[in-house]
Image (cartoon, grey):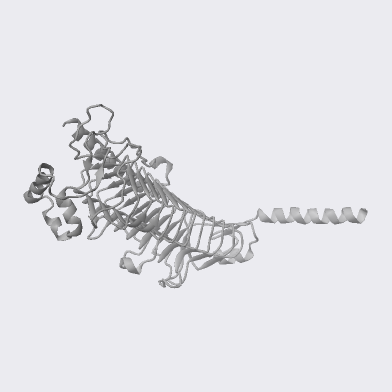
Amino acid sequence: MKHWCTSLAIVAAGILTAAGAEAATLTVGPGGAHRTISEAVTAARDGDTIQVHAGVYYEQVVLDKRLTLEGLGKPRLVGGDRGSVLVVTADGCVVKGLLIEHSGSDLQREDSGVLLKSNDNIIEGNELRDVLYGIYLLHSARNTIRQNVIRGRTQLELGERGAALHLWNSPDNTIEDNAISDARDGLYIQSSPGNVIRRNRVYGLRYGVHYMTSDDNTFEDNTFARNVAGAAIMYSRRIQFRRNAFIHNRGFSSFGILFQDCDDCLAEGNFIIDNTTGIFMEALRKSTFRNNVIAENDIAIEMFSSASENVFQGNNFVENTSPLRLVGRSSTTRWSLNGRGNYWGDYGGYDLDGDGIGDVPHKVQNVFEYMEGNHPRLRIYLDSPAAQALATAERTFPVIEGSREMDPAPLMKPTEMRSQADDAAAKPATQASLAALSMMLLTAAGAVMWKGRRRRQTR
């Protein structure tokens, strides 16, 4: 019995010693115990914290132990233009407060500012610049990527850059409150289900968010502005996006949101404003668009007849040059649900019973817009007197065959929307200007809503 108690005491002492060792803090830099970060990593044990003082550290670092790497005064970690600057191979690491720059230039080798090859890490409050990929998640799950500023390489063409955040076979991550610019894609997500993306500001690149074969993802309260496309959603199912702003994504072939071969998606409460094409749909099936503002786009919706069984309800269509370009003769789109359709800024009907629903169905396309869908060269005449005369003739003489796309229950008033403006005071100082940008864009969205409401009131 005495021997057994002695053994227990030894084990308990070992546990306490290990626990005490986990609390160690190592310092790097002027006045610190270590000159380089790599030297401190070698000396550290699982659970230690490495504090890096302000300065410039020319090295590539590998975290192969469960460590907290904390920058004090935004120290610069410079990779020397080769490989990845910081590689995390141990689970449960924390990296915060660093300025990470000058990765290598090999797309095939995933040269990144931060390369994650492990799970349950937190990457928070860092700035990354002049990196090929920003933060690359490779077979890496349940990480939190928060409040980082990521800038790509502006000297490269878009196709030569990496994504700011690249996820490959990396499920169940949380990506929030990041500021992203000048990369190829803001967030590229492939074969990575179950991720949550929220409150990021993404601008000045190809695709703001790009899903490839990634089911059950959610993105909310993000701003995607001045890109080739705000979002490209491809070969994925059950993508849900709410209260995002897709604004001023313009170019020869630019979109607010692009869908390619997707199923069961939900778009709710988004602002899709001032894009070349608001929503592009090819082979999108059984998806719902509810309570969105789709306004001031050249084309509100471009839809192929391969898009089937989708529902639009409670959306506000205001001041779009063309509401719909349908490629094909007809679609199975439903423009209302349970007796409630959408608000159309150009609806000319009436509501005699005062129930808020127009008594006359709304034709989504006039005959010229219908013809333009299958003959794109006609687009240059879209606002011409001839096009307007043909649309008038269609209304006057119904024998002219036009579009079959109808909203049977158009709304007389716009759907009320709740703007998700960022609170600049709650953001880090490095992101204050981007918070102001989000405020400005969502204020513009509110102005569009007001304009549509005023048009109805003056009729």
- The residue at the far top in this view is 353
Residue 241 pos. (x, y %):
40, 48
Is there any visible trace of residue 70 in the rendered image? no
Instruction: Identify the residue shown where x is 75% and y is 54%.
Output: 15
Instruction: Identify the residue shown where x is 28% and y is 52%.
Output: 331
Is there any visible trace of residue 335 in the rendered image? yes
Asked where in the image residue 316 lies, by quadrant, the reply is top left
Residue 168 pos. (x, y %):
47, 64
Q: Camera-side residue: 94 or 197?
A: 197
Left/right of residue 382 with respect to residue 86 in the rendered view = left
Residue 152 pos. (x, y %):
37, 62
Instruction: Identify the residue shown where x is 29% and y is 58%.
Output: 228
State whether residue 317 is above or below residue 183: above
- The residue at the far front in this view is 399
Q: Camera-side residue: 57 or 122?
A: 122
Residue 75 pos. (x, y %):
48, 58
Asked where in the image residue 425 lies, by quadrant, the reply is top left
Quadrant location of the C terminus in the rendered image? top left
Q: Camera-side residue: 395 or 382?
A: 395
Left/right of residue 162 with respect to residue 414 in the rendered view = right
Q: State the count of labels.
A: 0
